[in-house]
Amino acid sequence: MSEGYERTYRWDDPQQLAEQAPTTSGLEFLQRMIKGDLPQSALSSTLDFDLVDAEQGTVTIEARPAAYQANAIGTVHGGVIASWLDTAMGYAIQSRLPAGVSLTTLDIQVRYTRAVRTDDKPLRIIGVADHVGRRTGTARAEVLGSDGRRHATATTSCLILS
């Protein structure tokens, strides 16, 4: 039996980030995270991903697969991948929301098409908002390998909180 691994990481107070969200439009909030004016989410530190691009209705996250994300058979756990996708889709919807309006996930459906290995190169998760209304929003996302091959896709419905 091996001695195991250890991982140490830091994150910023999630409450401080949450307090900044209502002060700007969703897109400006996301762009401030990308520029480093605001920290990335605590979850991004935990699962090792970053928001790297945000435009109106579309976002890109870069995720770094690693051994600590492994399931029992040595590939990245589906729950980690689902979290990457959920974040990208939520951010895509958020990018179309005005100041003071937020959202929460109502449902998510994930389809895994190719395993993500823990030693894979960084992945891109692209999220696209399909509909943003007064009460609900819908979005889709995909996980792409460095070779452009798709590893997973997802769809979501979110509740708009005004």
Image: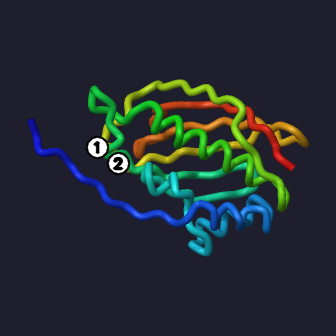
**Amino acid on which the number 2 mark rests in the picture:** Lys
Residue 115's quadrant in the figure?
A: top left
In the foreground, 19 or 150 = 19
**Amino acid on which the number 1 mark rests in the picture:** Ala
* Residue 41 placement, left or right of 157: left
Element class at badge 1: helix
The image shows residue 12, relative to residue 130, as above or below, that is below
Element class at badge 2: loop
Of the numbered discs 1 and 2, the one sitting upstream in the chain is: 1
Residue 39 position in % (x across, y down): 56, 67
Residue 108 position in % (x across, y down): 64, 29
Q: Which mark is residue 108?
A: none
Residue matched to label 1: 67
Residue 29's quadrant in the figure?
A: bottom right
The image shows residue 12, relative to residue 110, as above or below, that is below
Q: Residue at x 58, y 60 (%)?
A: 14
Q: Residue at x 39, y 50 (%)?
A: 64
